[in-house]
Image (tube, coloured by chain):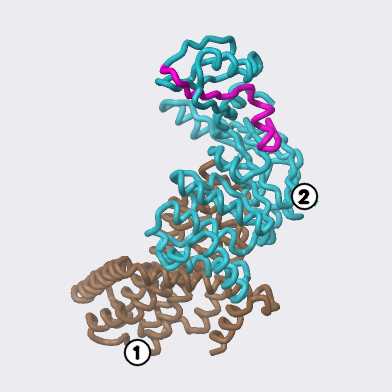
Amino acid sequence: MSAISVQNLSKSFRIKKQTPGFSGTLKSFFKPDWQDVTALDNISFSIERGERVAFIGPNGAGKSTTIKILSGILNPSQGEVNVAGLTPWEERQRLSYEIGTVFGQRSQLWYHLPARDSFTLLASAYGLDKDTYASRLSQLTDAFDIADLLDKPVRQMSLGQRMRCEVVASFLHKPAILFLDEPTVGLDVSAKSVIRDLVYETSIEDGTTILLTSHDTGDMERVCDRVILIDEGQIVIDAPVSKLRSSYISRKIITLHMSVSDISFEMQGVEIAEKAPHKMVLNVDTSQQNVSTVIEKALLLASMRDISIEDPPMEDVLRSIYKNGQG
Amino acid sequence: MFCALFIKMVRDNPQKMKSDYLKKLYVLYVFAKTSFDDHMGHRLRLFFRFVMCVFFMFVFIEFWRLIARENFIDLPFPIDDVCWYACLTQMMLFLSPRLFISIDQDVRSGDISYLLIRPISYIAMRVSEGIGAMSANALLYYTAGIACVGFYIGDLPSTGWVGLGTALLFLYLGSILHLMYQAISGITALWLQQAEAFYRIYQKILIVLGGLYMPIPLYPDWLYTLSKFTPVYVMMYGPAQFVLGWDNGESSAEILGLLLFWFAVTIFLLGWFYRACVSRLEVNGG
């Protein structure tokens, strides 16, 4: 049985439309004009136990709405959802033992109390006995390196430290499924990297199913194996992360480190992305030009100290997918 | 003793506790205790709120002394008792934390996303936290606050320590009921996106029909009767009237009976309203 199964899920919100100006305000007061906005439009997918899936898309695509329905916070307009064998919005309390959540800009820790107090509180809420709680906390304290933070009031922690504690709080009751909604938002590069690695390693160790939403492609690449791309409430792509590059990009980036200072390079399907003394970055459209042909031509023009061939950054891949709206 | 043993047993091994109801009760106790610790940690906030309360109590004592001195109304109670009454009703307002604001902020900030998916009812958790914070306040108000009032008035109420003790006990219970009505006001934020409007209406009813400014037997008969049919009667006047030395007061059994009745009605109302509002919830922030 899948950890998460979603069938024909739709969600609409009713919002009040108001025309500007005093007359619009009066009209809206006496006869409000309501408009239905579709956040999710008939989406279906399933996630197997232990899978780590990134749920990505532009702002307003429906990512957070999906997570909130899956975790039982919102009721859908229609569709069937099964999370750990339960219908989330009908069995919210039973489901809470099976899931954990990390919402990047929210906090589940008591602001003025040490993190340990919040952990103890959550352990009681989830019915962990004293020994289980002690061993679980010790395990997570080591894994997330928060021994120094346990007795520090949350208000005195940096965002990165707080997020580590937030993730520990979510892992404390050993959930079978973890929902992460933009867990690294606002963090610096090193804090992001720490959170990603820790989530990945802990999920491998515990066999946790992960559903992650993020605008940061690093989260997706480091933590997840599969990506579901959603746009305007519909699933656009559902593929392994590794295939996303090969299937949806027809570009390569070639960096040339030349022994001469400069060369003149012109070729169909090749753009010069960056030029500096002894260095040139080429953006190659592989549907028009082979990478090997480009390198052969470059070698004819000058001897090279080094050549590197890279895929474009994942941001560019996604930008191109959003822009073309392709599936 | 029994409570302490129960708490230790559940804390050490919650799995052994067979009754789900008792397990949940223990979890609510932990939330209340954490809130108590958190509230006690805010010493300055606790102190300034207490100073404000004492200031208002002194203002009301002087206000009633002036009324008695100038014979504005014919008081059926000793003036010192009315001063004690005014101080206790004032204390009741300051005793409870502003729970409706916490709920309103949870909705506005979207933190409710976290709180709704815990294995414990969100609203029961918030009320428990309110009781924890209120208990921290009570510790200060029932000791230093009562000492200040006693010192300023110069005597105990005519009902003595028994009357005062009974009043304080019922005031605590009435304040729990008040927390529940604050929770109902707070829940409106799930629907209307703000709780302030509903709470203001409730607060006016509490102040007027609860008898904040004067004992309600001084009201016109129709208003006194109307007050008796509302829950605010047992939150404010009901408890505080135990310091009024007169023969027409309600007995402890009557107030307890009314409190239990209103607790039952309010818990039902709170549960129904919560379920109705939560189904309409739209969480802020994506």
- Residue named by callout 2: A2
The 10 Å Cα crowd at callout 2, few under 14, some 14 to 19, many 20 or more, is some
Residue at the spot x=70%, y=57% of the render? A91
- The chain that hosts pointer 2 is A
Circle 2 — which element? loop
Residue A238 in sight from this viewpoint: yes
Viewer-proximal residue, A91 or A24?
A: A91
Residue at the spot x=55%, y=71% of the render? B28
Q: Which chain is brown?
A: B
Q: Position of residue B269 (x, y in %)?
A: 59, 62
Q: Quadrant of residue B80?
A: bottom left
Colour of chain A in the image = cyan
What segment carries the magenta color? A236-261
Above or below, B236 against A202 in this view is below
Q: Position of residue A65 (x, y in %)?
A: 61, 42
The 10 Å Cα crowd at callout 1, few under 14, some 14 to 19, many 20 or more, is few
Q: Position of residue B72 (x, y in %)?
A: 23, 71
Task: Confirm whether the magenta stretch covers residue A239.
Answer: yes
Total numbered circles: 2
Mark 2 is on which residue type?
Ser
Q: Position of residue A135 (x, y in %)?
A: 59, 71
- Residue named by callout 1: B160
Discs 1 and 2 lie in a common subunit:
no
